[in-house]
Amino acid sequence: MDAPHPLDRFFAPDAIAIIGASPERTRIRGQLLHLLRQNGYAGRLYPVNPRYAEIDGLTCYPSPAAIAAPVDLALIAIPAQAVLAALEDCAAQGVTYAAIISSGFAEQGGAQTRLQDEIAALAKRTGLRISGPNAEGFYSAKARVAATFSPAVEPRPGEEPLVASERRIGVIAQSGGMGFALYNRGRAQGLSFSHVVSTGNEADLTASDFFDYMARDAETAVIMLFIEGVRDPEKFILAAETAARQGKPVVITKIGRTKAGERAAASHTASMTGWNTAYDAVFRKYGLTAAADPDEAVAIAAGFVTCPLPRGNRVAVVTTSGGAGAWAADALASRGLSLPELSPAMQQSIRGFIPAYGSARNPVDITAQAVRTGGLIRAIEVLSGADEVDAIVVVLSLASEARISIDTAALQRIVARQSKPIQFYSYTLPSPLGRKVLAGAGLTLHTGLVPLASDLRALAERGRFAPPASPRPYAPAAAVSAALRAARGGLSEHAARQILAQAGLPMPPQRLVSGRERLDAAAESLGYPLALKIQSPDIAHKTEIGGVRLGLATPAGLRQAYDEVVAAAQRHRPEARLEGVLLQPMALPGVEMIVGTIRDPGFGPLVMVGAGGAMTELFRDVSYRLAPVDADEAMTMLGELRAAPLLNGFRGAAPADLAALARLVAQLSQFAAAYRDLVQEIELNPVFVHPSGQGCTVADALLIPLQR
Amino acid sequence: MDAPHPLDRFFAPDAIAIIGASPERTRIRGQLLHLLRQNGYAGRLYPVNPRYAEIDGLTCYPSPAAIAAPVDLALIAIPAQAVLAALEDCAAQGVTYAAIISSGFAEQGGAQTRLQDEIAALAKRTGLRISGPNAEGFYSAKARVAATFSPAVEPRPGEEPLVASERRIGVIAQSGGMGFALYNRGRAQGLSFSHVVSTGNEADLTASDFFDYMARDAETAVIMLFIEGVRDPEKFILAAETAARQGKPVVITKIGRTKAGERAAASHTASMTGWNTAYDAVFRKYGLTAAADPDEAVAIAAGFVTCPLPRGNRVAVVTTSGGAGAWAADALASRGLSLPELSPAMQQSIRGFIPAYGSARNPVDITAQAVRTGGLIRAIEVLSGADEVDAIVVVLSLASEARISIDTAALQRIVARQSKPIQFYSYTLPSPLGRKVLAGAGLTLHTGLVPLASDLRALAERGRFAPPASPRPYAPAAAVSAALRAARGGLSEHAARQILAQAGLPMPPQRLVSGRERLDAAAESLGYPLALKIQSPDIAHKTEIGGVRLGLATPAGLRQAYDEVVAAAQRHRPEARLEGVLLQPMALPGVEMIVGTIRDPGFGPLVMVGAGGAMTELFRDVSYRLAPVDADEAMTMLGELRAAPLLNGFRGAAPADLAALARLVAQLSQFAAAYRDLVQEIELNPVFVHPSGQGCTVADALLIPLQR
């Protein structure tokens, strides 16, 4: 897409003012001008500093106002207290963008936070778009803008850059250190970059703004994001949608996963849900690939720029060392990739050009000897054309320059017309020549088995990914909205079920009984055996106070249960408003599941499904998605559960009604989306999923209205 | 320990014959002599090759017999067909050891396997100890023996070796490529090695022999093992015991995990148990640290040689980049390490020497500025002396040589007197100077967060490890042995329970009833409600054929159940020998667990415990140990289960009788060990663990005798 974007000139300014420029190169402010020039920026540069008349041969201006020419970007590196005045000056001069390097704002708290708020207000008032403060600046390759003090952009004279791919990666990082570290690590592997931007405190421009830019930017083939927290979830989701629509892969790291504050919600679902659950639900929905460490992030990005997407997860390993090949096979299989034994025809073909002590099964051990006689290239070639594998991993040693004997030109020809990923891994530390030979063929080189396996898994997942056909949220019904609004003080199960049923969710028959004498009639109309539960908008967790009796088979048992649960409620919660008891037929047998929604303050409602009972809690075996989802996406969620076999006819049981469960998940997610401003949380637990064709029964329901 | 070892001279020979020596350095046989001399071997070298009178100035001999002097080691690199004769010749000359580099033996199958068998027989007959064939040889640092063609031992003139630690690592690998790759990777990080040995096809000397050697070798501080399969499990276990007793850490990789053939056993336990389960059970017992990839293996070994063991798992992260520090914190916490917020006093102390925009909580963000003013060293120093953390991780960037400002001498002083691990991680790719500065202080440098976290976890686990006080297997009782021997055709549950009860295991009351008319009397003596199960030595899985009825509460129900299960058995297994039905009182409520044993053909009986029901199978939430274990080790096994909270009072339930369960696990393991030659497998499933003090009930039992 080449439509104009509001940030186009940020990354390609015709003129840059460096406010606070200095000739002292050991200081940050001195490095900015120096690095811009060293990297060959071709536009106009205006140093601004009242202390100098000229710096390094360039006229130096006392203030932005003194520059009698248009300025696209002001790079600001002056003490925090002077920043606001400089920005006012820039805005008055019609400067388009400012990037504030200076620290001393919200990261220090107190008055400095207020100073940052004033910067944000200035941006809004004047239209000056501001990046930072407290940022490390940015780098843009095409326009050669090194607007940063990061040592990662220091040119290294005499060092020939390694270029494995010219498909460019864009990096957006809320930590300047990490953004430029990803650039540093990627360059060493022969990757190319479009832009690297450090977003700092995000007083005005946020990571989501830059994400949107790079999602649309024709220069950027793959995006890397390093996120501590998203300030504008809706904008972030729109950018993620754009990237998904463009088919542009995104490798994302969200940190702060283990320290994230736990939400203070009383119910079970919420107690397992931190902020990061919402991020992961968004990442899954839009196909963003999460990376656990910098090596993995760079390895995955390298895979995306150098490889086509595989059609499946079947990998052939080609190796010169049996031990290393087997280790790679283990690492790949343990990440969910499949290593099928090759077909007899394929094995026969391979045995034609490897020694007798090699192996053609998979891993294919061509032996070191066959490399010298062209066997490596032939093995890659024959596997490239075969339908029986979706990706090729070559495991070898590229440590000794004297022993490298890869025909780069031949490899390059195969890579150029490849339709499946070809990845190389050196089990020894590679020599520079080893990397160079592969870069000449358009390939990077892995040195870690774990990142290699993560990369192939990411490629396979991406190959399967299709942007979700999210159902549009339906318009809220006035009656349901009114009932939810009226219920802000709490809802009994009975009332919650009425609302959900009204919105079209399948609910089993029930009777609210408010007097002991009415039990028999209600029981007769429902039929034994019955469940009996205390009903009060003030009692969310009925079991905990002894307010539930199950499997009641006789009128006498029913009456006794009634007396007991009422007494228990009065004893444990004397202040609770009692509505009576709820009678329900006992659910037929089925697989016990939990279905629920929770509302993230930023991203909105998420829907969850998991195996019921202790499994949800002990094994965190739960799948989340940003709501709403359709039944197809709900089915994908079910497939992600480790407990999925329970639903597919476990130990000889009848397969469960997956379609009915997926429908329930979708319906509940659509309800949560439609009433997002009124519902905090819903928990259907347990839901019994009956054999195929027999639907599912919501055995208990909790709906917590949103407190405003 | 400095006691003499039969392999001492293998690694430190006074004289080496190179059989097949050649002046052609491009060939393997030519490299051997060359690399031995290049690495400064100081002993006598005897090239043997009838085609030459001298090689590189050394007299060349036509045969081993022609060397009129003692030879400790013959290094053999001649065609496979000539190897046996050369070995005979060596044995006749009194050569002590041979290392066969030549390929073309069992790895090719057929006649070549028989050739290898002859080599093994020769070793046994003559006492010549033989390593290989099909090996990459070995390297020994102290005696400077580079008896290999691996490029990893090629001296690199002009390259100053990096030495972070002189505590040496010994490497034993069944793949020569991987053994020397670990050496190559470790050296690049500044690690030192004692010996690297490639064991090849192991016709005579095995990995276990070398493991035993290195476990006793005073030169070797840490052992790395790369294993495809252990040929002599008992010897391996003895070596592991020795290493554990010596307090010598072992980093081990066992490959072939995902292709391992599945055992063809009918029962449930066996279906989840591959060979690798036995390896893992052995590794856990003796505290061997398993490594998932070469980076992780080297990182963990580096931690063991450079760090003292921590007393706990509390880590402080000290960083110069907030983003990188938080990422490291996430990576560490996700591997089970704890990152406590520092105490107010500690925070106050740290705030004294860092800027206001830093943080003293944990991660401690000292900021890049504080590094320049000595803040890094002070932070490490103050945390070194604090009781509130057990390890320190420093996260910084060592990419730019110009910006490195670490006081090596000061750091070295802290490291020298450290009592807790100090580890450095560079989030950018480090410059050589960065590594050198740290090596000067006795430290290596991590570049991967995942390996770093694995390393710290390994250190913490090792810190907790105590060699197990394995109970000595008790002497089998003649009556039990006889019963097991008599039952080789199969055992009904009733018979299995009798045997287990006879051996002292707690079994609930039971009655075998062989006629419908005897049901009432048996039921009366046991008391309702009852379980009724068909009994036959030919029916292992009673539920599957409809042979079990539970919760029978009346005589009429009992009779009906009797008729049904007998009919079901006759229908499904018309040939089965029916003994009658087993009556048992229904078990009181409790947490459902599974306890069992399985016999690995190599390592012998393993004991397992897991949460019952679907959890064992879906989540593989099972702990295994080499049998026998005592109750303490059984308690450790219980603590490893993710389902452990179920036993500790889950959701308000009473805590379960852990002690009784641990006792049952220990007793069963001791039974399996005592009768290891008679028992294939035992499965107690389910076992109901009642509230604390009330014991546990074995509700079903299966014992499969060993078929010979």
Image: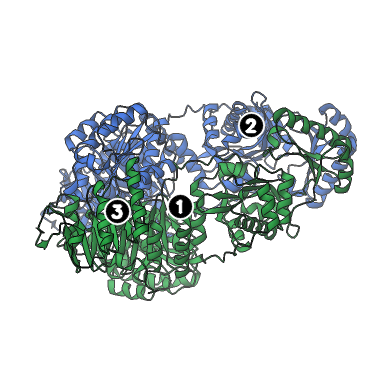
Chain colours: A blue, B green
Above or below: residue B661 compared with residue A515: below
Q: Quadrant of residue B90?
A: bottom left
Q: Quadrant of residue A51?
A: bottom left
Residue A328 seen by the camera: yes
Above or below: residue B535 compared with residue B277: above
Task: Give the mark toward the camera: 1 or 3.
Answer: 3
Q: Residue at x 26, y 51 (%)?
A: B83
Between B258 and B459, the residue placed more toward the observer is B258
Residue A206 seen by the camera: no
Q: Give me the C-alpha separation between circle 3 and circle 2.
A: 48 Å
Respond whether the residues carrying marks 3 and 2 are from the same subunit: no
Q: Which residue is mark 1?
A: A256
x and y percentages locating residue B88 in the rendered image:
27, 56
Q: Chain of mark 2?
A: A
Q: Chain of mark 1?
A: A
x and y percentages locating residue A122 in the rendered image:
36, 47
Q: Which residue is mark 3?
A: B181
Mark 1 residue type: Gly
Which labelled disc corresponds to residue A652? 2
Q: Residues within 10 Å of mark 3 (few under 14, many from 20)?
A: many
